[in-house]
């Protein structure tokens, strides 16, 4: 048997300094007083939002209300002008030190177009975060993890060794999801995961998100325009309008509000069709 | 300090081995236990997971793989844990991560063969591309309103005006080097005055245009390839085709025109600055006054030297632009391809320019313009 102490010693030399415990607090994502501004145009003005652990939070809003900017602020790609952002109990804003490294190993991000590394196969794409954060894992184990993650995301086996350019749009999204799930994150960010998918594929993707959320205990921040997604899998929905989160709640709670945009959103022909479809069962 | 998953082997009354796992079984804590699982030898009757505090799919996978290999059962797993193990079990896969490699003999003969075929296909493609360019030229002549004057002027600016500083500086310095080094050698025969002939003729016939072509290939040829290549990747070129815009007409023709016209002007400009560079260093170190250097140039450099340069310049420009645009149009697949094609565009352009330059040298000498 391998001498365990040797291996541990070896590992500690090049491993990241600290791996956070599983987060057991109530709100994995906390945004307070966020202000984002491009030039003179203010996108977010004193925006606050809390995401509960274990829920799928749908984020909706008209085009240009800053849904993606909000997500980019939370994951640290966009430095906000003001405000405080915490993910898994750690501040994202302000200090960008070694702390940043740890937190990135605890979240997964699926960008709109998948954002796969085009020179790597799907399997290798999944391996990248594993190599980055857990270099101590044996090659075999890393490959096995990559393989089952690909299947877990609903891709066929053959897709593992394919390059992104050989995949369809829907498959790219699934491959992107496989990479986002590579590290068994606690928080998952999905930017319009079902946009551009056919209704059958979109419904499957929704079911997959729900299943993975339940089995892996994820907290999901999900930006979407898809009313079906909101009705079928989201626990709560946050509405972005007027540069703020104007309401957070379950869909019935939101429908009861009388903000004009929310009324139009859920009460319009598409909103009514989607809600009637989900009321029956 | 990181907490690792622990493992203990217990032998029960009947002599069967049981493996007791404790601690967190998550991706950050399984590196060691994974190795130990791999080294376990049959017979192992069961894995006892009652001591596991945390588990994620990676941890579930290591347990699943070990139990599958040893044909052991799982005991003491909470509902969440067995759910996780079921989930990864349903996704177990042996698929290769990289595309399967061909056997050695196939690659040994296959790859050179494919390279040759690619080269032939490349020749056909270039001819096809030239044909597309000629058709676009014909279309523009028949419908002059489709000539994109603004795009052409924009390319004039990018290829020509923005290159003035760097090409001027480069030529000036080359003039200094040629005059200074030439003078050092000619002094041995007491013929410093011939430095003027050397600088003037070399600059006009060869260096001015050749160095400019290399610079334009590096600056603009690469830009053509990268820009058109990226447009290809983002389907902009397909979008053009679907709305009836011919990408050759819209993208390639303005760039070719710009490279041809600007090479002519930049080549002449480079010649002038090379001579000025030579004159400057001569005035400073050889004692030949600046004015008399320039006057002497008029006497020792025959007019046909300038014609040679002005014939070569647009041809070189054409080659640089065609190499850049052709390689850009060939991009498909991924971002690495853009880089590869850009490199190829520059290398091919410079190589072709130098080969043609040698051809021109022989050709014009045979014509009597020696």
Image (cartoon, coloured by chain):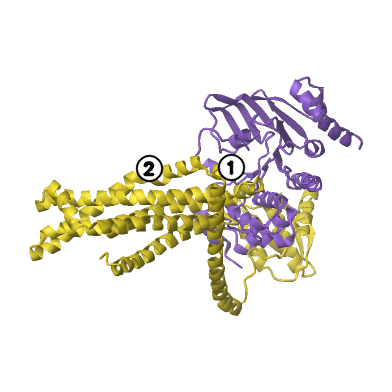
Chain colours: A purple, B yellow
Q: Can the viewer see residue B217?
A: yes
Give the camera-side residue of B205 and B368: B368
Asked if residue B229 can be seen in this view, the reply is no
Residue B208 point in image, percent of width and height = 29, 55
Q: Could you tell me if the residues under marks 2 and 1 are in contact, i.e. CB atoms within 8 Å?
A: no
Marked residue chain, label 2: B
In this view, the mark in front (2 or 1): 2
**Mark 1 residue element:** helix
Q: Position of residue B313 (x, y in %)?
A: 36, 55
Q: Which mark is residue B14?
A: none
The residue that disc 2 covers is: B161
Same chain shared by disc 2 and disc 1: no
For numbered disc 2, what is the local secondary structure?
Answer: helix
The structure residue drawn at horizontal position 83% and vertical position 27%, both measured from the top left corner, is A252
As measured in the structure, the alpha-carbon distance from the residue carrying label 2 to the one carrying label 1 is 49 Å
Residue reaching furthest to the top:
A258
Q: Nearer the viewer, residue A112 or B98?
A: A112
Instruction: Name the residue furthest left.
Output: B190
Q: Which residue is mark 1?
A: A103
Q: Give the answer, above or below, for where B132 lies relative to A257.
A: below
Tell me residue B346's x, y (percent): 43, 58
B140 or A213, nearer to the observer: B140
Q: Residue at x 26, y 56 (%)?
A: B204
Dot 1, crowdedness within 10 Å: few (<14), some or many (≥20)? many
**Circle 2: is it few (<14), some (14-19), or many (20+) Cα within 10 Å?**
few
Q: Residue furthest right?
A: A280
Q: Residue furthest bottom?
A: B105
In the rendered view, would you say A54 is above or below B22? above
Of residues A275 and B357, the one nearer the viewer is B357
Q: Quadrant of residue A46?
A: top right
Q: Is residue B307 above or below residue B40?
A: above
């Amino acid at each position: 048997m391998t001498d365990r102490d040797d291996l541990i010693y070896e590992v500690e030399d090049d491993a990241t300094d600290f791996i956070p415990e599983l987060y057991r607090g109530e709100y994995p994502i906390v945004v307070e007083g966020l202000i984002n501004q491009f030039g003179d145009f203010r996108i977010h003005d004193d925006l606050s939002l809390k995401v509960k652990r274990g829920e799928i939070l749908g984020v909706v809003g008209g085009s240009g209300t800053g849904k993606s900017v909000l997500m980019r602020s939370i994951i640290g790609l966009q430095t906000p002008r003001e405000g405080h952002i915490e993910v898994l109990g750690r501040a994202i804003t302000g200090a960008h030190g070694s702390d940043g490294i740890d937190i990135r190993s605890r979240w997964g991000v699926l960008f709109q177009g998948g954002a796969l590394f085009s020179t790597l196969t799907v399997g290798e794409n999944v391996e990248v975060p594993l190599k980055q954060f857990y270099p101590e894992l044996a090659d075999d184990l890393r490959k096995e993890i990559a393989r089952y993650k690909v299947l877990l995301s609903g891709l066929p086996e053959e897709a593992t060794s394919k390059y992104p350019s050989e995949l369809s749009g829907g498959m790219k999204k699934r491959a992107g999801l496989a990479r986002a799930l590579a590290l068994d994150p606690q928080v998952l960010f999905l930017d319009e995961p079902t946009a551009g998918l056919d209704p059958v594929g979109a419904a499957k993707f929704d079911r997959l998100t729900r299943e993975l959320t339940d089995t892996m205990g994820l907290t999901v921040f999900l930006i979407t325009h898809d009313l079906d997604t909101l009705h079928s899998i989201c626990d709560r929905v946050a509405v972005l309008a007027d540069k703020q989160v104007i309401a957070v709640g379950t869909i019935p709670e939101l429908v009861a509000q009388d903000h004009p945009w929310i009324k139009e959103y859920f009460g319009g022909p598409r909103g009514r069709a989607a809600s009637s479809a989900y009321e029956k069962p | 300090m990181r907490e690792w998953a622990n493992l203990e082997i217990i032998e029960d009354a009947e002599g069967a081995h049981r493996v007791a796992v404790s601690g967190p079984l998550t991706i950050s804590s399984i590196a060691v236990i994974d190795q130990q699982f791999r080294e376990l030898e049959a017979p192992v009757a069961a894995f006892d997971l009652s001591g596991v505090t945390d588990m994620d799919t990676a941890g579930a996978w290591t347990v699943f793989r070990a139990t599958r290999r040893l044909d052991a059962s799982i005991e003491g797993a909470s509902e969440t844990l067995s759910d996780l193990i079921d989930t990864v079990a349903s996704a177990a896969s042996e698929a290769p991560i990289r595309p399967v490699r061909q056997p050695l003999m196939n690659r040994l003969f296959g790859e050179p063969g494919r390279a040759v075929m690619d080269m032939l296909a490349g020749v056909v493609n270039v001819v096809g591309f030239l044909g597309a360019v000629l058709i676009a030229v014909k279309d523009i002549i028949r419908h002059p309103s489709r000539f994109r004057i603004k795009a052409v002027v924009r390319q004039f600016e990018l290829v020509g005006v923005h290159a003035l500083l760097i090409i001027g500086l480069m030529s000036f310095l080359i003039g200094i080097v040629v005059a200074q080094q030439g003078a050092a050698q000619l002094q041995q025969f007491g013929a410093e005055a011939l430095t003027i002939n050397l600088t003037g003729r070399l600059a006009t016939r060869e260096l001015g245009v050749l160095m400019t072509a290399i610079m334009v290939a590096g600056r603009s040829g690469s830009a053509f390839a990268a820009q058109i290549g990226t447009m290809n990747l983002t389907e902009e070129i397909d979008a053009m085709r679907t709305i009836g815009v011919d990408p050759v007409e819209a993208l390639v023709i303005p760039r070719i025109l710009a490279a041809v016209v600007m090479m002519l002007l930049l080549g002449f400009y480079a010649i002038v600055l090379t001579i000025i560079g030579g004159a400057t260093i001569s005035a400073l170190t050889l004692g030949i006054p600046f004015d008399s250097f320039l006057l002497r140039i008029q006497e020792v450099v025959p007019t046909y030297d300038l014609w040679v340069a002005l014939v070569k310049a647009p041809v070189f420009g054409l080659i640089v632009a065609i190499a850049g645009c052709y390689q850009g149009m060939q991009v498909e697949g991924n971002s690495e391809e853009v880089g590869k094609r850009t490199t190829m565009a520059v290398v091919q352009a410079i190589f072709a320019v130098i080969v043609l330059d040698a051809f021109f040298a022989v050709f014009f000498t045979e014509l009597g313009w020696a």
